[in-house]
Image: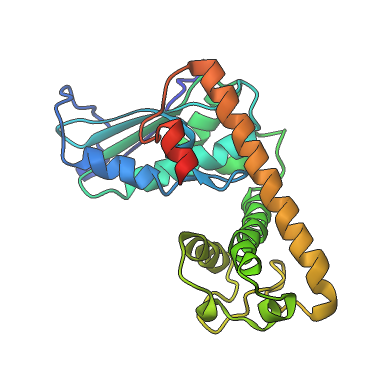
Amino acid sequence: MTDPTASRTAGPGGSSSRASRAAPFPAADGVLTALEAVRDPELDEPITALGFVSSCTVSADGDARVRLRLPTYFCAPNFAFLMVADAYDAVCAVPGVRSTEVSLEDHFASDAINGGVAAQAGFAASFDGEAVSELHGLRADFLRKAVMAGTDQVCRPLLAAGASRAGLLAMTLGEVPASAALDRLRQRRAELGLPAGPGAPLLIDPATGERIHEEAAPLHLRRARSTRVSIEANSSICRGMLRHRYDSAGLGQAPEEERRAQ
C-alpha cells in the first residue's frame, strides 16, 4: 500500500533525510498562519476555521508535518485533493521550512491524494483512469459561487439601511462602507480576474464581470441570497458531522460560541 503522506524536500542538494528532533521551531506559527489561507473550495472558509487541521509540527531543522481530516470518510475526492494540494503549497512557501509533508487521514482516497500531491502529479494523473482533467474549472465555479454569496453579504446591510435596488445598481465598490465582507468579496473577485477596484460596479455577473442591468437585478439578488444560504447551510452540516466524527477542535479553530459571534 502506498504510504499515505504527501511530502516535499527543499533542502540543499534535494536531500530527503528527515530530522530526528522535533523541538519547537520559529516557523511553526508561520505554518499554521499559512494554513489559514487554505480554503475549503465548496464552503469558502479556511480549513483551520472548519477544524480540518488535526496536527501541525515543525522540527528544529524545519521539517513540517501537517495532518488533515474531513467530516466523513467519503468526502468528495476532488474537493479533498484541492485542499491537500493548497495546504502543501502554502506550507512549502513558509520561510524556514526545509521540507513539507501533508497527510489527509481517514479518507477512502488518502493514498491516491497524498501520493499524487507529493509527486506533484496533478489530479488526473493521481486518479488515472477515473479523472480526465484537472480541477481549474471546478475551482473557478466555486469562486463564482463565493462571489455571489459575498454579494449578498455586502448588499443585505445596505438594503436594511435603506438603500434601493437602483442605488445598488449605481454603486461602486469604493462607495460601499468598509467591512470584512467587502474585503472578502473584493478578494474573491480578484482571484477570478473580475473587476475589484474602487471604481468597479458592486453588482456584476460573476461569469463575465459585466455590470448587472436593471431588469436582471431582482433575479441576481435572489440568486446571491440563495447561494449564500446554501453555502452557510452546508458549512453548518459539515461542522456538525466533523464534531460527531472526532469530538475535538482542530488547530486554529475558534470555539463555537466565538465563531457564532463573528
Percent across and percent down for residue 7 are: 38, 33
Asked if residue 13 lies left or right of residue 162, the reply is left
Please tell me in which quadrant of the rendered image residue 163 appears: bottom right
**Left or right: 150 in relation to 39:** right
What residue is rendered at 43% in x and 20% in y?
A: 248
Q: Is residue 192 visible?
A: yes
Please tell me which residue is depicted at 44% across the width and 34% down the height of the picture.
257
Q: How many marks?
A: 0
Residue 126 visible to the viewer? no
Q: Is residue 44 left or right of residue 118?
A: right
- Check the image and report above or below for 199 versus 24: below
Image position, residue 179 (x, y; %): 46, 64
In screen coordinates, is 136 left or right of 89?
Answer: right
Res 206 → quadrant = bottom right
Identify the coloring.
rainbow
Front residue of this view, candidates 4 and 259: 259
How far across and down, in percent of the image, does residue 112 sit?
A: 56, 28
Whether 31 is drawn above or below 70: the answer is below
Residue 21 percent coordinates (x, y)? 15, 23
Question: Would you place residue 34 above or below residue 192 in this image?
Answer: above
Which residue is at the front of the view, 126 or 102?
Answer: 102
